[in-house]
Image: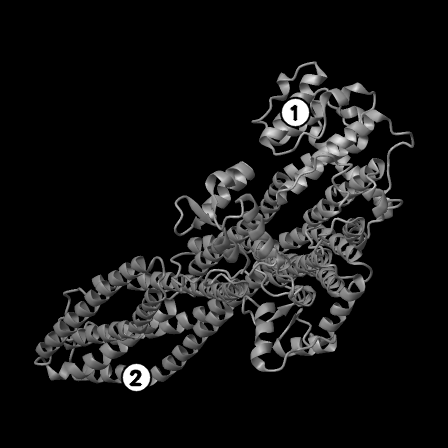
Amino acid sequence: MAEVLREERPEQTQDATWQKQQIKSFTAWVNAQLIKVGLKVENIGDDFSDGIKLMKLIEVISGDTLPRPEKGKMKLHKIQNINKALDHIASKKVKLVGISSEEIYDCNLKMILGMIWILILKFQIQDISVEEMSARDGLLLWAQKKTAGYKGCNVQNFHTSWQDGKAFCALINKHRPDLLDYSQLSDDPRDNLNLAFKVAEEHLDIPQMLDADDMLATSRPDERSVMTYVAMYYHCFAGSQKTEQAAKRLEAVLALERELQQMISDYETRASDLLAWIAQKDGELSESERFASFGDLKTALAAFKAYKSSEKPPKGEEKISLESHYSALQTKLRLNNRPAYHPSEGKLVSDIQTAWDALGGVEKTRNSFLRSEQDRLEKLEKLAKRFKTKSNIHSKWASGKVEACSSEECGSDVGSVMGLIKQHDAFNADVEAHALRVENLKQISSELREGEYENADDIESQLAAIEQDWESLTAQSAARKALLEEALAKQQQLDELRLQFAKEAGAFASWCETATEDLMEDVDAKKLKDVDEHRATFEALKEGVAAKQTDFDSVMALSASNVEAGITSNNYTALTAESLEVSWNEISTLINEKEESLNLFVFDLLKLLTLWEKRSRLPLQNKQEEREAVRVRFAEAANALGEKISSATTSVNEPGSGSLEDQLASLQAQQVDIANLKPEFDDVAAIDAEQQEAEIYDNDNTEYTMSDLAVMYDQLNGVATKATTTIENQILMRDQSGISEEQMEEYKDAFKKFDKNKSGNLDKNELRSALLGIGFDVPEGEENYQKIWEEVDPGQTGACSFEAFVDFLSKDKTDASSISQFIESFKCIAGDKDYITEDEVRRELNAETAEYVISQLAPYDGVEGGLDYKAYAEKTFQ
């Protein structure tokens, strides 16, 4: 205090001019105080001699009540009053060196002026503080800042810098430009001084403590007088300065509020957009309508691949970014004493994660569906090819069959009729045997229709034509059969004598014809199996020929009997023993030729098959080698990338060492390394595309699939981003809450110790253990503990993050000043009213902030045009 009150003027004799200035300025200052209690001094040297006005002066400037003054007129009484005043001054730790009650009683003007100067310093100037400087320097700095930029104004001291009056005029214009136009000042210092003194006295209630003539009468005006007068300006404008500071505080708080509201709006918008995209993709990927063709399937496979490789990864990054945004928002709200943000229904981080996980399940289902569709369409293509092959075979078989059974020839006798009947029975047996092929075609067509084959209509049209031809054939065969049976009935009325020969000869001839036809049928086979079937049929035919030897002998005997009986002709048959013998011998010849033909055909077929096998094996082998090469290349690239991602994940998850800034720098470097893995990831994806093109769906050379690597890479990005956000939030909390590095490490150790499943979060019981572990006084009763849990988990996720844990421990629970300062700042610019007007808001705040806060303030009940700033404060902080 002694240093503050030490005179800081040059050591020199105070001349009469300075004393005159002090008497005038100090008298004006004293009267400016005493007027508050209805008193006044006329002569500053004499009017304090009884101590009464001095006591009143001390009461006014200190705000304290002194003991009652003595009413006596004796010197003793007056000395006692002066001592009461001086003792009270001393109680304020003010040292009045060399100034005693006797000096004041004796009206020692020099001592009285020194005392008044000390009082001015203590109660008028000492409380002035600008940028933590001393009272004198602080007042000078204030004057310099307020007059900066005014032409011809250069404040360097409290004497010569004020002689031209421009500094006084600049102070008035700075705070009340409506009272004085600085640009209209004259070049006459006396005019400027008188203008400033007059305006200050008439409009600012600052008494005129200085005189223009006194200021100009000396080369160096009295510093004490000037400082006292300038201090009156400071206190006069202190109210406007307070309002300015209040406005700045409000602008800072409102800027933060706008930032927080924008962050909330951004979260809501981004969360809505991400959830809408997830819902859209969920709907698109949930479609399970069968594909009509391979072209449609390939289009769907390409779209699904593009979704997995190009569309979903950016959305995964957006999800991670949104989670970081939400974490940063909640941290800012907590650190700035704001209520926790509760997203709209369905937009919690956990809701987004649930939707994201569900989308992953839909993806798997979609992938399985596409693969099953591929299998289905491949099966249908094979069935369609089988139908085409069988229908072609049927068409070849059916060609000419209707015409063959449309003949009107019925024979001229029993023998010829019976021959025709047997021939027709053989034909009909072939037709009945072929009926199974027609049923097989029907079955294939039905399966194609049930499988929704794209050309099922064409297949059914072909089948309808086949069925129509088949019905015509069976109907014509039945008609032919009926016709022959009718002819036979007629012929049976003819000579019974010819019947036996005709019958047996006809049967034998019919067999010969059939056997001959069978033996003359060309060998048509593409496989050895088909040749074996021909040979089996041939061997059976040979056995049949051997068995017919008896029949041949019987017919020949019967013919001889007929000849012996004198029968030279037979109306029932044109057959003769000679013709039958020729047929029989021809069959024997055909058997030998058939056997030789079969042997030669087998030899030629074996040579062709051997050659074909040699030629076809080489391209197949080359293709398999190419597919295996693709597998190996993918495996090598995937294994290398998988190891790098696993290693990077382990590194990111390892506890950091050093300061938080060091840990942040390390994580940021690791994020750069992770980003550098993207080209390698794209290379592996390109090889995987080659696998898909080559229809390679399994790879025993690696444990990784492209989907596995994509999930691992996305998770690595997420873990790194989350770890970086966590460290950034820790730095933010440390800087704003004053937590030391040692305290942060203590909190971190406790958190990790009780995070049993290493999830990066604490559940309700783990939080209680962690709080107890660091010595926190956990309140008794579940209801009280539930309040703590709700504070650290405002989003009701069931988990407490490390940021929330540290914020809870570092938060000053007794600090309720934020809302009170907010209200006090509004009250200041509102002129101590409980409401504020739009004009007051626009006058004190910048335009952008003013319009924002006006849009947020509700009307104040009972006052037209009034705005309720208290309600807005409660809404903002609670």
Which residue is labeled 1 in the image?
A: 196
Q: Residue at x 43, y 72 (%)?
A: 534
Q: Quadrant of residue 754?
A: bottom right
Which residue is labeled 2 in the image?
A: 551
Label 1 to label 2: alpha-carbon separation: 158 Å
Picture coordinates of residue 470 (x, y %)? 24, 66
Residue 131 in sight from this viewpoint: no
Mark toward the start of the polypeptide (1 vs 2): 1
Q: Residue at x 89, y 44 (%)?
A: 98
Q: Callout 2: 10 Å neighbours few (<14), some, many (20+)?
A: some
Q: Quadrant of residue 615?
A: bottom right
User: In the visual, does 223 lie left or right of 170?
Assistant: right
Q: Residue at x 78, y 42 (%)?
A: 121
Residue 146 in sight from this viewpoint: yes
Q: Is residue 373 above or below residue 788?
A: above
Residue sitting nearer the eye, 445 or 682 = 682
User: In the visual, does 372 lie left or right of 5?
Assistant: left
Q: Callout 1: 10 Å neighbours few (<14), some, many (20+)?
A: many
Type of amino acid under label 1: Ala
Task: Please say which color scheme the image uses.
Answer: one colour
Residue sitting nearer the eye, 799 or 95 = 95
Identify the residue at the far top of this view.
187
User: In the visual, does 844 lie left or right of 641?
Assistant: left
Q: Is residue 249 above or below residue 803?
A: above
Type of amino acid under label 2: Asp
